[in-house]
Every structure is written in C-alpha cells, then in structure tokens.
Amino acid sequence: MRQLDLVVIVVYLLAIAVTGLRLAGRQKTSKEYFVGESSMPWWTVSFSVVATETSVLTVISVPGGAYSGQGFGNVELALGYVVGRVVVATVLIPLYKRGGFVSAYQYLGTRFGPRLQGLASITFVFTRLLAEGVRLFASAIPIKLLLDEFGVHAGYRAIIGVLTVITLVYTYLGGIKAVIWTDAIQMGLYLGGAVLAVAVLSARVGGTGFARALDAGQFRLFDTDFALAHILTSPFALPTAIVGGAIFAMASHGSDQLIVQRVLATRSLRDGQKAMIASGVFVTVQFAAFSLVGALLWSYDEGRTFQELGLSSSDNLYPDFILHGLPVVVSGLLVAGILGAAMGSLSSALNSMSNSTVADLVHSFLRTAPSEASLLRLARVMTLVWAALMAVFACAFSTGTGTGNVYLTGLTIAGYTYGALLGAFLLGRTVRRANEADSVVAFLVTVAVMTYVVRAVRIDVTTAGATVPTAIAAQWLVPIGVAVTLAVGGLSSLLHRAPEAAEVRTGANGPDSGEGRVTAATRPD
C-alpha cells in the first residue's frame, strides 16, 4: 500500500511545478522576474514570507523540540518576532518601497556607495549558501526514511539532486511570481498537515493524554528562569525570546534579501506593511500547531526517549510518526507537505540570490545599462549557478556526523552576519556623518568579531550538578553584532570631517539618490 504514498508525492511534485508556471505567466523584464512588477496581493506575499522562513527546519525540528522539553517555547519566540516585524514594517519597508528598489541592499548603495552594497550582497549570498545547505539537507531526512520503507536505499546526495532539479524548473522559468504562488500553496499543505496530525493524535490520546502532557509541562509557554547565564545561553529564556527575538526578526526580515524581496513584490507600501505584520501572526499560529504536535506525540509515545524509540535525534520524531503512525495516503500528503516546505525555502533562496547578484553586484557596477533581454538572461543563468552551488553545499553538509537540531543550527549560521547587515542599515539611519569607509570598516570588523563570538565564546552553565560550557543563544548574536557595527562605525566617523549636507547620501529621496547608477533593472516605475 505504500505505493499510494509515492503516487501522492509524485502527483504533488508535478502539480506544484505546473501550477506555479501557469500562475506566474511569462516574464519580459528583469524587474518582473525579481519583484513581479510589484503587483502581488499582500496576503499571498505574507504566506510566501512564512513559507520562505519556515522550511523543513521548522516542520521537523519544532515538534521534536516540544517533545524533548522545550514546550511551547517556539511560540514565545514568535511573540518576539512579531514585535520585530512591526518595527521593520514601520522603519525599513518605507525606505525600500519609496525607493523603487528590487534589492534591500540598494538602500546601502544610495546611502553609502556601491562598495558596501556589494559587500552586503556577497555576505548575503554566502550566508544563504550555508543556511540553505542545512535546510536542503534537512529536507532529505524524511524522504530517505520513506524510501527506506520500500527498501530503496537512496543516498542523501541523490535525494538532494532530484529535489533541486524539480524546484529549479518553476523557479527558473516563472521567477518571483511562481515562487510566491507556489509558496502560498505549499504553506497551506504543510500547515494543513500539522492540523491533520493534531486531529489524529488527539483522537488517539484523548483527554487523559492532554492532561498528562499538561502536568508534565509540555504546554509550558514562558521560560521564567532569569538567571543571567540562562538568559544568555537559552534561546527560550523570556528576555531572550522577546527582546533578542525582536532584534533577530529585524535583521532576518528587514536586512535579509530573502524576505525583503517578497515584500517588494506587493502593490503598495501599505500592502507591504500588512504582509510583513500578518506574517508574524501566521508564524505564531504555525509554531503553536507544530508545538502541539510535539506535545501530543509525547503523550502518544508515553514520554519515551528518542533512543528508546529507535531514533537518532529529535529531528526524526515527526517524520517517523508520519510514516508509521498515519494511514496510507494521509502519510503521503504530509510528506508532500514537508517537500512543500523544502521547495518553498529553496525556490525563494534561488530567486533572491540571483536577484542580489544581478542588482547589487553585476548591475550596480556597470557603467552602461544592459538591455532588458540581457538582464533577464543573466538572472536565469545565475539561478542555475546558485542552484548547482546550493546542491553542492547541501551534499557537503550531508557528509557530517550529525546535525543536532537543524532549526537552531540555521539560527546560529545567521548569527555570523545578521548583526553586520542590520547594523549597516541602522548606521545609515542614525549616524549621519558616517561615510562609505566607516561603514565598510564597521561591517568587516563586525563579521570578524561575530565569527569569534560564535565559535569561541562559551558561558559556564550548571545543569543537573554539572557545569557545561555553552554557546551564547542565537538571538543575542544579532544585537551584539549591531552594537559592534554602530560602535565601530560611529567612532570611525569621528576621525574625519563631517560631510556637508549636500554630500550626504540620504537614500532614494535625498539629494544624492544614486540616480546616476540606476538603470533598467533598478529604476522605479
């Protein structure tokens, strides 16, 4: 009967590619390829933002984390994310929409110059390669489990290759419109899968199962341990989740092209703001659904350890239940939902990396304006290039000995660069006398400092009578990076003469808006 699951999955893969291409239509310009001529409905964009940031990291890691003692801590995190998105909607989105940009880093180009714009773009694409490599590998975990059920022992590399090729088809041809529409469909599928899993588990554990989970603390929302070491090292400590989470969201949704590009595809500034804030609400609901799956699985499995269940890590818990705890066809639908999460984040990454390469690196340094046909060809070529590199990075990651919790792994990777990216935007907004040299020095120093902090700084935490050196929580990496950027950039700006008012690059509406460098792909309509 497992063949029916495979039929469901194959039909889904074909349907999502065809649907994405039909909804996207035919692109004629690079701006249409990258931001859909800013014509997308806000609610569709909001769903796409959620699908882009969710990926397999959330789908398979959050239930496992809730099972193993995190409770509803991810919902607590989401509350901080909502606060951060409100700030982004108020402060940063107006800069991008009024400037007519197709890339977030074009603001840095107009404020500081092309060197910082290029540096930010390089940092973005390199970070995306690492983070999406983790995500793409994670997506292969449930697929490998399913194939193993049939005695087909496909390697991670083969699975990664097939998944990349299928996603590339509609991303390459359909551009951002195909990405956004398919994201919206895929979000409905994997979130619906979580709701279905909750319904099945609720029927099996009954009211007593809920009561057992409640008594065991599986529904705990807030972590109120205010010990300093705990706050600095636990991603679920209340100050870390709310304050650190808010600043982290400002970086991930205000300075990361992966998310900003979606907002730039909306019809107006107000629509962009609605899409951003609504995405925070949807993410909170999503975290609650997946956390509830984990809590009910704890009752269903009677609180047994992962080792007792025959699982290698918490990330195998939800996929294992899908394959062994659900009826045929239903399990196929939920695996298709996990595929949807994987394909949504991958397609978004490919299009945004191609966008940043063309708009921030190639295009911004050209003296003459290429034709639209040339820019569109280049955009598609770069989509192919990044797809190949993404698959290589994912395959390299799959050779490791283990991933731990891939969701937290993804947050840590972002910690290397998010502080520098958000700090550069805030430096441009708050330190008027800072120039391009100040911003570049501050950016490079921040990345170096954060590399040391992530890799070397540990805080002693006492757990069960044992003292364990523990890394700083991922949410605090961004505010640390922002502080370093502002401090270095601010101090550096004091070492030179303050620029005259006419010399300051103030952005798209300022005296030097960079119009001399704006050409076909970046010019506002």
Image: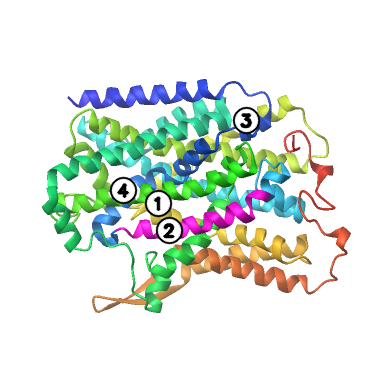
- Which kind of residue does numbered mark 1 sit on? Thr
- Spatial separation of the CA atoms under disc 4 and disc 1: 10 Å
- Residue topped by disc 3: 33
Q: Secondary structure at mark 4?
A: helix
Label 3 Cα neighbours within 10 Å, binned few <14 / some 14-19 / many ≥20: many
Label 4 Cα neighbours within 10 Å, binned few <14 / some 14-19 / many ≥20: many
- Residue topped by disc 2: 79
**Span colored in magenta:** 72-94
Q: Secondary structure at mark 3?
A: helix
In terms of sequence position, does the residue under pointer 3 or pointer 4 come before the other? 3
Identified at 65% across, 47% down, the residue is 104
Q: Quadrant of residue 30?
A: top right
In terms of sequence position, does the residue under pointer 2 or pointer 1 come before the other? 2
In terms of sequence position, does the residue under pointer 2 or pointer 4 come before the other? 2
- Spatial separation of the CA atoms under disc 2 and disc 4: 15 Å
In terms of sequence position, does the residue under pointer 3 or pointer 2 come before the other? 3
- Spatial separation of the CA atoms under disc 3 and disc 1: 30 Å
Label disc, if present, on residue 290 of the rendered structure = 4
- Spatial separation of the CA atoms under disc 2 and disc 1: 7 Å
Q: Is residue 456 above or below residue 388?
A: below
- Which kind of residue does numbered mark 4 sit on? Phe
- Please identify, in this view, whether the residue under mark 4 or under mark 1 is nearer the observer: 1
Task: Kindly check if marks 2 and 1 are in contact, taking CB atoms under 8 A apart as contact.
Answer: yes
| Horizontal relation, residue 17 to residue 368: left or right | left
Q: Is residue 130 magenta?
A: no
Q: Position of residue 489 (x, y in %)?
A: 70, 68
